[in-house]
Image (cartoon, coloured by chain):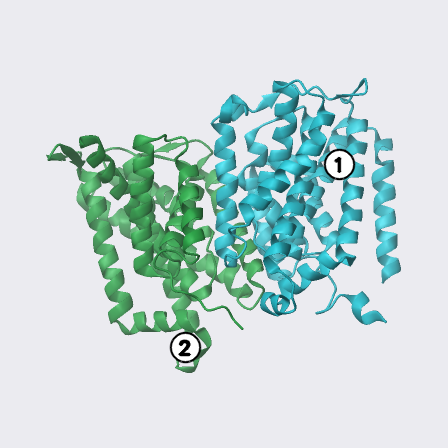
Chain colours: A green, B cyan
């Protein structure tokens, strides 16, 4: 029983990361109908950038640890947002009116550039995150041990998700985003600056993804240049499971996938975990072709 | 126009047929690989370019052909000729079984499902499925002896690959002119209109998957003979992504485009070996730039809504 609960906690942690990253995919897909393959690599880049900021700030030695950590999160989010805007401007904007597959190839190209750019700068080997970024405290509740890192991850993820939901549902900008997701042309007629909306969703997605990237570094400690493919693909599956383009769906999908992979890794085999994930995905797609919370899309006639 | 294309192909085939005169083993290997990869890219084009289905897991069928050959030869001691029918039939059967439930999915969902199949395949290979696939290292030591001849010299393998490419191009030419080719074309233009004309979209979509898989399996057969070994890396998801990019960078349903795409992705890197570490970075850049400059691909297929021979007379 303890093992089961421990795996559930692990699942919630992985699920938090997947959910954070999945939101970046789902928002871009919702408005642009484009799989932003570069998003996963942006998450990887965030982990490396964050580590760089951390070593720099600690080296300066003028700020208390907690301040350094907050600064790392903020600075990394800023850099991630800037890179996301650059990718959008260079690789996606010129292709808005082009055939959809061209944009997919351009996205793959951008992804390969970021991934291999990381490799060229930081090298192909695993880079280690220091273990003392967050306090090493841990608590035991009903026989399950929860570390400070885990608790922080779950709480920060929940706070971010609630804020995003409030932002999308109750602000003017959020309404504009939802309108653009339904029909860009009509949104334009209503005076919405769709270019602006697209930039905002790229920024919001990148900020959430950068938090996910830093979590990956702090939780797993070892990061490598190609982690974007692995986490990006899983997060993308999470988005598809929940129904891509659907924000609550991606959160549910993220946690579901996290729990599923943790339980498979705990009870079946970790070397087959990826295969099981995809088998689950294919089975769900056969039953519900647009994901669990995805809307039924009418075929054009 | 027709003459220009004819001359182009004549020059290409003459060049490829006479290429071994160069007599440089390294370049012979490179051009052999070019022929094999071109066949895989052309087979993917049947699914992606002609039937219009986003298949990003095509290396799966390529790998299946290679692994069937290696397993039969190394583990069961059968002559590679025994593998020849199986590398066509088994990938085609798998394609039918795997694609039937998913061909109706919307584009991006299909893309992810096919990525998934490729990754499941890769994990099966790495986890030494049934103790046959040899785990992460793959299988070594194929014995490619046919009628007493041992196929280990580059020249023989080169000509096998060359004839495979010729065969594929002939087959695709026939496909273009056949009922199936026209049906696929209309399905891509407008599936609902095609359905209402009595074309079974599901049948032809599954058919295109099976045909593409059979050809890719055949290419895998030659690939495994060329290297006398197989390993999971050659058939992973990244390989599928590159084939996917070749078809779209070259131009969907366009044979010159796909041959040019394969040349750029697989042969040019051999010329610029010194940039080996930056290779994929440059690939990525090339993909973005070429899509911005030519969103339809380098040599887009030149036909209107209807194939020319329908309107010609």
Q: Residue at x 66, y 51 (%)?
A: B45
Total number of numbered labels? 2
**Residue, far front:** B198
Is A221 placed left or right of A300 in the picture?
A: left
Is B299 placed left or right of B133 in the picture?
A: right
Give neighbour class at mark 1: few <14, some 14-19, many 20+ (Cα, 10 Å): many
Vertical comparison of A274 with A236: above or below: above
Chain of the residue that carries numbered disc 1 in the rendered image: B
Chain of the residue that carries numbered disc 2 in the rendered image: A
Q: Residue at x 81, y 66 (%)?
A: B309
Is A225 placed left or right of B216 in the picture?
A: left
Give the Cα separation between the discs numbered 1 and 2.
52 Å
Is B139 placed left or right of B298 in the picture?
A: left
Numbered label attached to residue A187: 2
- Estimate the x, y position of residue B95 in percent, counting from the top left: 59, 44
- Estimate the x, y position of residue A184 in percent, counting from the top left: 44, 73
Vertical comparison of B234 with B268: above or below: above
Vertical comparison of B246 with A89: above or below: above
Report whether residue A61 is seen: no
């Amino acid at each position: 029983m303890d093992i089961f609960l421990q795996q559930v906690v692990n699942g919630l942690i992985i699920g938090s990361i997947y959910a954070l990253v999945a939101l970046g995919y789902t928002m871009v897909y919702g408005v642009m109908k484009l799989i932003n393959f570069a998003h996963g690599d942006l998450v990887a880049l965030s982990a490396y950038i964050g580590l760089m900021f951390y070593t720099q700030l600690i080296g300066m030695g003028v700020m208390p640890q907690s301040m350094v950590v907050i600064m790392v999160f903020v600075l990394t989010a800023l850099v991630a947002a800037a890179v996301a805007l650059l990718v959008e401007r260079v690789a996606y904007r010129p292709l808005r009116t082009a055939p959809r597959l061209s944009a997919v190839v351009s996205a793959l190209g951008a992804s390969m550039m970021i991934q291999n750019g990381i490799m060229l700068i930081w090298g192909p080997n695993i880079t280690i995150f220091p273990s003392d970024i967050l306090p090493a405290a841990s608590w035991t509740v009903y026989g399950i041990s929860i570390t400070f890192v885990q608790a922080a991850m779950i709480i920060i993820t929940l706070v971010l998700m609630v804020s995003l939901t409030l932002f999308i549902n109750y602000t003017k900008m959020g309404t504009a985003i939802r309108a653009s997701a339904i029909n860009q042309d009509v949104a334009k007629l209503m005076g919405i600056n769709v270019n602006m909306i697209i930039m905002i969703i790229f920024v919001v997605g990148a900020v959430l993804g950068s938090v996910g990237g830093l979590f990956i570094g702090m939780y797993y400690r070892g990061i490598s240049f190609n982690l974007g493919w692995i986490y990006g693909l899983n997060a993308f599956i999470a988005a598809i499971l929940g129904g891509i383009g659907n924000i609550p769906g991606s959160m549910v999908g993220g946690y579901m996938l996290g729990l599923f992979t943790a339980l498979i890794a705990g009870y079946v085999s970790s070397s087959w975990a990826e295969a099981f994930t995809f088998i689950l995905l294919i089975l769900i797609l056969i039953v519900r072709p647009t994901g669990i919370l995805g809307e039924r899309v009418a075929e054009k006639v | 126009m027709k003459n220009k294309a004819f001359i182009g192909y004549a020059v290409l085939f003459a060049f490829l047929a006479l290429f071994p005169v160069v007599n440089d083993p390294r370049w012979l290997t490179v051009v052999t690989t070019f022929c094999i990869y071109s066949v895989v890219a052309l087979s993917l084009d049947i699914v992606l370019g002609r039937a219009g289905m986003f298949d990003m897991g095509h290396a799966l069928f390529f790998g299946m052909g290679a692994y069937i050959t290696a397993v039969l030869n190394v583990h069961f001691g059968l002559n590679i000729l025994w593998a020849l029918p199986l590398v066509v039939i088994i990938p085609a059967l798998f394609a039918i079984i795997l694609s039937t439930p998913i061909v109706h999915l919307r584009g991006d969902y299909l893309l992810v499902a096919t990525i998934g199949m490729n990754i499941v395949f890769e994990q099966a290979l790495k986890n030494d499925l049934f103790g046959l696939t040899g785990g992460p290292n793959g299988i070594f030591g194929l014995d490619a002896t046919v009628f007493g001849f041992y196929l280990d010299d580059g020249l023989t393998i080169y000509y096998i690959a060359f004839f495979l490419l010729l065969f594929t191009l002939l087959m695709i030419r026939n496909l273009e002119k056949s009922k199936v080719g026209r049906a696929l074309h209309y399905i891509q233009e407008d599936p609902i209109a095609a359905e209402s004309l009595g074309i079974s979209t599901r049948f032809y979509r599954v058919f295109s998957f099976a045909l593409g898989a059979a050809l890719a399996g055949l290419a895998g057969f030659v690939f495994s003979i060329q290297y006398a070994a197989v390993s999971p890396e050659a058939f992973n998801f990244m390989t599928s992504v590159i084939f996917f990019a070749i078809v779209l960078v070259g131009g969907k349903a366009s044979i010159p485009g796909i041959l040019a795409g394969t040349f750029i992705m697989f042969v040019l890197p051999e010329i610029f070996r010194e940039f080996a570490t930056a290779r994929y970075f440059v690939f990525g850049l090339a993909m973005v730039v070429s899509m911005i400059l030519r969103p339809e691909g380098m040599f887009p297929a030149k036909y209107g809504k209807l194939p020319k021979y329908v309107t010609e007379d």
